[in-house]
Image (spheres, rainbow, N blue to C red):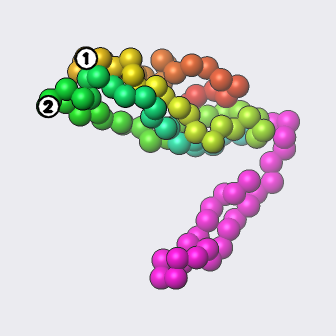
Amino acid sequence: MVREVQLDNFKGGILHVDFYQVKLTENIRVNVPIALKGESAAAKMKGNSLVQELNELTVLCLPANIPSAIEVDISPLVTADQMIRVKDLPRSRCQHH
């Protein structure tokens, strides 16, 4: 798995990549990006805006089960006082931390 990527800010290329070996039978803890999907009626109302407090979520799972992103459907948000919490997300093969 990729641990770190060092980029060349001047030329735009990759300078260095650090990898680490994982065991496919052991859970690992990784950060996974959160991807919003759908449209929120509340966010479309005049004077409202959508605030996303988390851009990624730490999960614990087997290396083969790591999702590329955690999709969160925001279409249920129809009033300004509604929110989606981590505990509201559907469970997958990974545990949210």
The disc at residue 79 is 1
Q: Is 1 situated left or right of 6 in this image?
A: right
Q: Are there few (<14), some (14-19), or many (20+) residues within 10 Å of tag 2?
A: few
Determine if residue 44 is in view. yes
Helix, strand, or loop for circle 1?
loop
User: In the drawing, does residue 85 fall left or right of residue 79?
Assistant: right
Q: Residue at x 65, y 73 (%)?
A: 16
Q: Amino acid at mark 2?
A: Gly
Q: Would residue 37 be found to the left or right of residue 83 on screen?
A: right
**Residue 27 in view, yes or no:** no
**CA distance separating discs 2 and 1:** 12 Å
**Magenta residue span:** 1-27
Q: For the point 19% across and 26% down, which residue is it?
A: 45
Residue 52 falls inside the magenta stretch: no
> Which residue is depicted at the point 30% across and 35% down?
51
Q: Where does the image place residue 43, in percent across and percent down from the top left? A: 26, 29
Expressed as whole percent of the image width and height from the top left, the position of residue 1 reads 74, 53
Between residues 47 and 51, which one lies in front from this camera angle?
47
The image shows residue 13 at horizontal and vertical percentages of 58, 76
Between 44 and 11, the residue placed more toward the observer is 44
Q: Amino acid at mark 1?
A: Thr
Image position, residue 69 (x, y; %):
58, 39
Report the front residue among 90 and 28: 90
Pointer 1 local density, CA inside 10 Å: few below 14, some 14–19, many at least 20: few
Residue under numbered circle 2: 47
In the picture provided, is 94 more to the left or to the right than 11?
right
Residue 19 magenta: yes
The residue located at (48%, 82%) in the rendering is 10
